[in-house]
Amino acid sequence: MKKISNFKFQISKFKNNTPLYPPLMRGELKGGVLHSRKGMALVLTLMVLVLITAMVTEFAYGVYNGTNSLYNWYDSQRLSVLANSGMDIAGEFI
C-alpha cells in the first residue's frame, strides 16, 4: 500500500490560509465591537427570558378573558331566568 505523506487536511482554512468564516461570525474583529463571545450567554439568556415572559403574559391574558366570558355567560343565564319569571308573574297578574 502506498502512503500519502504530504496530505494536509485543514477544515478551518482554505488553501490560501483564509479563514472559513468571516471575522464577524468568528468574533475576531480586532478593535471593534465583536472581539470575543463573552456576552453571547447574556444575550441568549435575555432572549429566552423575553420569550418566557411573552408566553406567560399571553397565558394570563387568555385566562383573564376566559374567566370574564364565563362570568358574563353566568350573568346572562341568571338574567334570562329572572326575565322569564317576571314575564310569567306579569302574565298571571294581568
Image: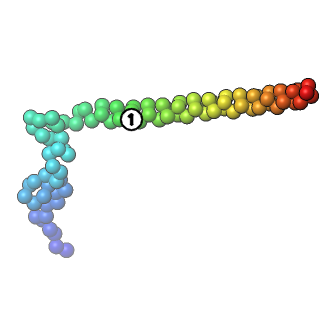
Question: The N terminus appears in which quarter of the rendering?
Answer: bottom left
Residue receiving disc 1: 48
Quadrant housing residue 47: top left
Q: Where residue 57 sits in the image (x, y, percent)?
A: 48, 31
Q: Residue furthest left?
A: 16
What residue appears at the point 87 percent right and 27 percent down from the top-left corner? 90
Residue 85 seen in this snapshot: no
The residue shown at (49%, 34%) is: 58
Residue at 89% across / 30% down in the picture?
91
Residue 92 coordinates in the image, percent (x, y): 92, 28
Scheme of image coloration: rainbow
- Residue 55, percent from left and from top: 47, 35
In the displayed structure, does residue 83 sit left or right of residue 58? Answer: right
Q: Is residue 26 left or right of residue 86?
A: left
Could you tell me how many numbered marks the image carries? 1
Image quarter in which the C terminus is found:
top right
Is residue 55 something one can see in this rendering? yes
Residue closest to the far front? 94
Q: Nearer the viewer, residue 74 or 53?
A: 74
Residue reaching furthest to the bottom: 1
Along the line of sight, which residue is nearer the eye, 45 or 90?
90
The part of the image, by quadrant, that contains residue 67 is top right
Compared to 14, does 83 lie above or below?
A: above
**Mark 1, secondary structure of its residue:** helix
Residue at x 57%, y 29% (from the top left corner):
64
Counting other residues with Cα less than 10 Å from the Cα at mark 1, is it few (<14), some (14-19), or many (20 or more)?
Answer: few
What amino acid type is highlighted by mark number 1? Val
* Residue 52 place in picture, x, y as percent: 44, 33
Displayed quadrant of residue 40: top left
- Observer-nearest of 44 and 5: 44
- Quick check: 11 above or below 39? below
